Image: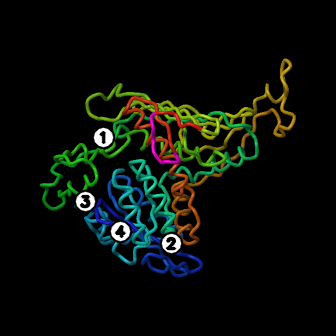
Amino acid sequence: MRKTGSVGAGVLLAGKAIGKVVRKTNGSRVLGANERINLAVIGCGGRGRSDAGSFKKYGDDNNNACQIIAVCDVYEKRKREAAEKYNAKGFLDYREVLAMPDVDAVIIATPDHWHARIALDAMDKGKDVYLEKPMCHTVKEVKQLMDTVHETKRVLQVGSQTTSADQWWKAKKAIADGMIGKMIMSQGSYHRNSIEGEWNWPIDPGAGPDGKGDNYIDWKTWLGPAPKRPWDADRFFRFRKYWDYSGGIATDLFFHVVAPMNICWDKPQYPSKVTASGGRYVFTNDREVPDTFHLLAEYPEGHSLVLSSSMANSQHIPGLIRGHEGTIIMVEHGMFEAPTPDIVVRPEKVRIEGQQGRHPFPDYKFGADEIRIPVEQYDMMQAHIGNFLQCMRTREKPHLDVDTAAHAQILISLAVDSYREGRVKYWDEKNWKSVDKPISA
């Protein structure tokens, strides 16, 4: 086990175990047959509050399956409000939450640069983890999380809830069945154009390290592993605009695109080559990260990925996967987090039927007409939570387990490095690092 020791942001717990008794390791409590799962939320900002509400709703709608018993945040106001709302214990230091023996799992919704540290400490304390996307902030942290999940046998679900939507699993089966033939290229986008969508979240006047009572913020702890800086309210309240704490579009938005793609593909995959471009075309003076960002990746199995995003324009492109014998369109409207009634398979009619001396595919058994496959409609966030809690009971892998999420995280981390360094990045999986030259066979 690693030594623990850093102080962090906020915490909120909820939980219940239904079914057979499951004995946990590493000092965690034993969950009885109809016992609620106790959860703590670490990080009670916008996403933490949203997650807390979603977990409470799941518990209320499913025979009190889970409950929030602790909350944590370095901002006194957020900690107090969350503790009062859920009648939970409140803490400024996340390590006090992890010391609670009756906490079964933590929901980590801090800024990105704290994700891995708190998750690692939580697993070492025997807690399961619901970890908001992105999974972590650095390539090194990806390996640490993977190794710790495998070592401790904890359940870790990354909080990109769209991966629990039905269309990705239907697409995975269609591809595995051979409906598009050899996979060639995947594409997706995440565009939006709004004030809050640009990460310009409200700033509370008077809040800071010198604030009294509700206005107190433990700025030193919030910075944690990031470079030390004097208090900056914009960095605290709008952290996604700064490289020290976030990867901007790549980590905040593209995770919702890349994680589902890795579910659709025959197997999750690491890229061999990644390049990124874009810039601050509209928002030039108030952030470090670009407002427009593009990513191109190649994979050793012989296919590529193209992603596009802008914070200054809201028009999407369809999310789809192209194959030699057909194309599967998972989100025709292009919005990866929005419901869709069906997925569409469009066979390559010319290739299938033959044309001008070309040989058709005699073994293609799906016909030349467009096929629409219905998608089951349900609340994907509630499904993602339910999958996590169920896996806590069964000890099975959740939908967005650490290994699947690692493939998405490596891609977007390489893209951030490519953009910031202005060069192509290559992935050396054997030595677990990015390099600036192609990996020799």
Q: CA distance from mark 4 to mark 1?
A: 32 Å
The numbered mark, 2 or 3, whose residue comes first in the sequence reads: 2
Name the residue nearer the viewer: 388 or 45: 388
Q: Is residue 49 left or right of residue 154?
A: left
Query: Residue 155's x, y, as percent?
Result: 51, 65
Mark closer to the observer (3, 4): 3
Query: Given the image, on which type of amino acid does mark 2 rest?
Result: Ala
Residue in view at x 47 percent, y 47 percent: 409
Q: Determine if the magenta segment contains residue 186.
A: no
Q: Which residue is mark 1?
A: 242
Per the image, label 4 sits on a secondary structure element best described as helix
Residue that appears at 19% across and 45% down: 232
The residue closer to the viewer here, 55 or 20, is 20
Expressed as whole percent of the image width and height from the top left, the position of residue 166 reads 63, 51
Question: Label 1 to label 2, Cα distance in Å?
Answer: 38 Å
Contact check, label 3 and label 1, Cβ < 8 Å: no
The residue under label 3 is which amino acid type? Val
Give whichever of discs 4 and 1 has the lower sequence position. Answer: 4
Identify the residue under disc 4: 86
In the rendered view, would you say 133 is above or below 290?
below
Q: Is residue 326 above or below residue 75?
A: above
Could you tell me how far apart the alpha carbons at marks 2 and 4 are, in whole angstroms? 15 Å
Residue occupying image coordinates x 32% and y 41%: 243
Q: Which residue is mark 2?
A: 65
Cα–Cα span, label 3 and label 4: 18 Å
Q: Return the disc, 3 or 4, that comes first in the chain's sequence.
A: 3
Instruction: Report which residue position mark 3 lands on.
Output: 74
The first of marks 1 and 2 along the sequence is: 2
Over which residues does the magenta segment extend? 429-436
Q: Is residue 235 left or right of residue 174?
A: left
